[in-house]
């Protein structure tokens, strides 16, 4: 009986040793040697794992940088120029200066401008509501205001204004693009922050014809083309009854803002315009 136990133990020990040897050689054959520079790059990244760089996370982004051997077309929106500068210095790579961006809500169909014609009483998700109907105001392209963008944001940079029912972006925005992807109607867009945070954009994405668009929202773009004609920089295009301002071409001259008959073009963080002096007032001043 003892001999059986001894033989069994020897057999098991032999199998264990053989298995260990086999596993060792298999591990040696298939082992992956990771470039140590990946850790260097990853240590310089903020670790937000937001996906704003276009990769699954900061580690994947670091791997992409090391493999590319160049920073061209690669950027961390959370860390910005400072982080990319540190990575470039650590890797000995040239860093291209990139203009900071921010999320912009291209819809002004507030509760006042686009009054509700029906009441939506179901799941509070924009993605769900979008699949069911045009929206409470009747605009098939406007913001639904149910906050999918708010839920998607990891930086507390966007909230729904209770008075207007529209999202409002604050200075916490790092342009990661999560809210852009979350919006089922593509209402949100990443645009240049602009000098002194000044931006001009068409706050409407409705492609319906003018009369129909105005029926649902009084500040809708009606595709009249006046802004296109007045722009000296060829920065505005008109397609499908909707004007669009190219933020890379726009020089912030503000001519289009004054020309828009519905107020669909917004200017942010500009000084107040001077009111024109009436002719009668000029005569009184001269006297």
Image (cartoon, rainbow, N blue to C red):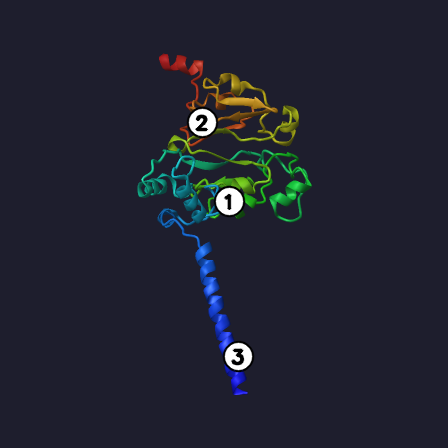
Tally the numbered discs: 3
> Which residue is pictured at 40% across the width and 51% down the height?
34
With respect to residue 220, does 46 lie above or below? below
**In this rendering, which labeled residue sits more in front, label 2 or label 1?**
2
Q: In the rendered structure, which disc, 2 or 3, sits on the residue that comes first in sequence?
A: 3
Judge from the rendering whether residue 10 lies leftward or rightward of residue 41; answer left or right: right
Badge 1 marks a residue whose secondary structure is strand
Q: Residue at x 42, y 27 (%)?
A: 272
Pointers 1 and 3 in contact (C-beta within 8 Å)? no
Q: Which mark is residue 8?
A: 3
| Residue 17 in the image, given as x and y percentages of width and height | 46, 70
User: Which is nearer the eye, 126 or 221?
Assistant: 126
Q: Position of residue 182 (x, y in %)?
A: 56, 43
Image quarter in which the N terminus is found: bottom right
User: Mark 2 to mark 1: distance in Å?
Assistant: 27 Å
119 is higher (above) or lower (below) than 232: below
* Label 2 residue SS: loop
User: Relative to 173, is 217 on the left or the right?
Assistant: right
Give the mark toward the camera: 1 or 3: 3
**Residue 248 — which label?**
2
Give the mark nearer the N terminus: 1 vs 3.
Answer: 3
Seen in the picture, residue 93 relative to 252 is either above or below; the reply is: below
Above or below, comparing residue 287 to residue 11 in the picture: above
Disc ID at residue 159: 1
């Amino acid at each position: 009986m003892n001999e059986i136990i001894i033989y069994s133990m020897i057999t098991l020990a032999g199998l264990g040793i053989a298995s260990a040897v086999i596993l060792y050689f298999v591990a040696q054959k298939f082992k992956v040697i990771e470039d140590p520079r990946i850790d260097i790059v990853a240590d310089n990244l903020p670790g937000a794992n937001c996906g704003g760089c276009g990769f699954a996370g900061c580690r994947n982004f670091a791997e992409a940088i090391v493999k590319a051997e160049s920073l061209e077309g690669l950027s961390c929106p959370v860390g910005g120029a400072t982080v990319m500068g540190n990575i470039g210095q650590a890797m000995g790579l040239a860093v291209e200066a990139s203009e900071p961006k921010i999320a912009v809500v291209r819809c002004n169909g507030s509760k006042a401008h686009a009054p509700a014609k029906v009441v939506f009483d179901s799941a509070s998700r924009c993605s769900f509501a979008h699949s069911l109907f045009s929206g409470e105001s009747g605009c098939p392209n406007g913001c639904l205001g149910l906050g999918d963008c708010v839920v998607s944001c990891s930086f507390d940079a966007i909230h729904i204004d209770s008075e207007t029912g529209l999202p409002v972006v604050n200075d916490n925005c790092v342009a990661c693009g999560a809210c852009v992807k979350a919006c089922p109607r593509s209402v949100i867009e990443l645009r240049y922050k602009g000098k002194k945070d000044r931006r001009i954009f068409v706050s409407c994405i409705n492609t319906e014809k003018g009369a129909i668009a105005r029926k649902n929202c009084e500040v809708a773009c009606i595709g009249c083309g006046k802004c296109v004609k007045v722009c000296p920089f060829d920065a505005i295009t008109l397609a499908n009854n909707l004007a669009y301002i190219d933020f890379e071409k726009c020089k912030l001259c503000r001519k289009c803002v004054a020309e828009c008959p519905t107020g669909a073009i917004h200017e942010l963080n500009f000084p107040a315009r001077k009111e024109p002096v009436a002719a009668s007032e000029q005569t009184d001043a001269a006297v």
